[in-house]
Amino acid sequence: MKIAIAQLNPTVGDLEGNANQILEAAKIAAIADIRLLLTPELSLCGYPPRDLLTQADFVARMQYQLNDLAAQMPPTIAVLVGLATVNDQAVASGEKPLHNSIALIDKGKVQRIFHKQLLPTYDVFDEDRYFEAGSISNWFHLYPAADQTQLHPAIPIKIGVTICEDLWNDDSFWGKRSYEVNPLEQLAEEEVDFIVNLSASPYTIAKQRLREGMLHHAAWRYQIPIIYANQVGGNDDLIFDGGSVAMNTQGKIVCRAPSFKSVLMALEFDKSLQNIGALKEQISCNFHQTITPEFDCDEAEVYQALVLGLRDYVWKCGFSKVVLGLSGGIDSALVAAIATDALGEANVLGILMPSPFSSEHSVSDAVALAENLEINHQTIKIQTGMEAFDQMLEPLFAGTEFGVAEENLQSRIRGNLLMAIANKFGYLLLSTGNKSEMSVGYCTLYGDMNGGLAVIADVPKLLVFKLCRWLNRDKEVIPENIITKPPSAELRPDQVDQDSLPPYEILDDILQRIIHKNQSTPDLIEAGHDPDVVAQVFRLLHRTEFKRRQAAPGLKITDRAFGTGWRMPIASRW
């Protein structure tokens, strides 16, 4: 039986557009004699729909769209479609009102509905807020051909259905269970011929290696082929990398879909009539075969994720062009390069805004970057604005010394100019702060934090440097001086970042241990860090929460980002 994975890029809430994506994939697959088409989790509404699920008309329209989609399907193909469905038992039982479901469409009708059994409620996931967990094992029979009037009737294939988290609870892989049931174990007991997993699994660095290790273990342990279909594309702060993959009974990868791209990947399941009970069936790949590792380093993977996340955020929010400030620093340089690759050089505008404190090389470096990227750039000197603010504030600031307030005014003048340009021409403003700065508040509220998207807000400073060096692997994209000069905000004479912060090698290691590993002060001191520096970083991290809460959404690339999954209090004395 031929199977295809539609690695789709849905837009949250675009029910008609998402349905058309599914239908077009099904039509192409039907021409290739595909019998079963897989689509990602919640493929009809997009993931994550969040509180759209609380709107009754949204859920009702989803059901209508499903039935309309079923009626248009080619008659020879069965399709698994992800959507939210109403929990009919909710009123009487007090259960959650919806299920996270998969609908089986075949012969122009919705034949079955399967419910997700394991509902994640951690990090960016909040499914228990909306959904009731399914309580039964999900499987169905499907004949290899839709028309069973053939001279030699086929034996139906028994297919197990899992939805994303259902796959992530095998205690023999993780060493523990996070949920009471293990859907994989249930399906093995049902003696299904193969298992499909329909996912919307967000990207984080190196997560594909973890997924494939988990899939390898499950397929090998249960001696059942597994086909994993994942969503691709950016939705708000989340990036979905795709990476759909198929494993045979030995846990070997037989094919992998390209990451960060919408593709249709075909497979073939061969069930030997002589060995039905022995579970020796194999899956083979007909095309799009990519078995060797796709990326030779994390930098290549991260960069593609950021390009996709930026592109989809811009387009799905209704923009086509972006504007950003070019300071001559490494952060804005990286964001400009990402934006150029995501949208094309004609759709990126860089604004240079030198002050009397800006060094000559900052301006020349920013111009060189713009020329390397072939993007439009303009220069607006901010000295006149600084003088105007000085005059307006002079009665109140008289007798005080130049300090942080005056430094931050420069950033806020720049932020106002960038917002004015964005408003005037309908551009999306990109902010350029990195994760290290966002962690400790080395950024200005209503200044350089202005923007509709914080592109590298989850990229630590050291990784920023690595990404820029990776970009320059074949030719100079980022001017070398931008990479080698000491980072500086240039808000006062001879300023460098390390006037206020520990060296980034130290800062990033401390932040990694606190944010990602939940280490305490004694842990950090035992790791060799200076107690005073540790205390400083903890203090800055906590006091900056009010800034982060007002920041633009940031693209998530790590397992702990300052976004949907970060839920720290602002008013706290811990």
Image (cartoon, rainbow, N blue to C red):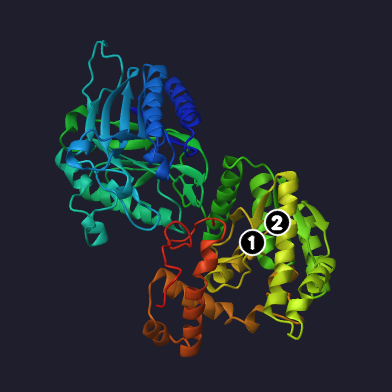
Element at badge 1? loop
Could you tell which of marks 1 and 2 lies nearer the N-terminus? 2
Find out whether the residues at labels 1 and 2 contact each other: C-beta distance under 8 Å: yes
Most foreground residue, 228 or 333: 333
According to the picture, the residue beneath numbered tag 2 turns out to be 324
Give x and y (percent) for residue 569: 42, 67
Q: Amino acid at mark 1?
A: Thr
| Number of residues whose C-alpha sits closer than 10 Å to that of mark 1, classed few (under 14), some (14–19) or many (20 or more) | many
Q: Tell me if residue 489 can be seen.
A: no
Which numbered disc covers residue 332? none
Residue 511, compared with residue 338, is above or below; it is below
Most foreground residue, 206 or 97: 97
Most foreground residue, 496 or 169: 496
Q: Quadrant of the C terminus?
A: bottom left
Looking at the image, residue 433 sits to the left or right of residue 563; the answer is right
Give x and y (percent) for residue 40: 39, 38
Residue at 38% across, 77% down: 519
Can you tell which quarter of the image residue 36 is in? top left
Q: Amino acid at mark 2?
A: Leu
Q: Tell me if residue 184 can be seen.
A: yes
Looking at the image, residue 348 sits to the left or right of residue 108; the answer is right
The CA span between labels 1 and 2 is: 8 Å
Element at badge 2? strand
Looking at the image, residue 124 sits to the left or right of residue 433; the answer is left
Q: Quadrant of the N terminus?
A: top left
Can you tell which quarter of the image residue 494 is in? bottom right
Residue at 71% across, 48% down: 423
According to the picture, the residue beneath numbered tag 1 turns out to be 432
| Number of residues whose C-alpha sits closer than 10 Å to that of mark 2, classed few (under 14), some (14–19) or many (20 or more) | many
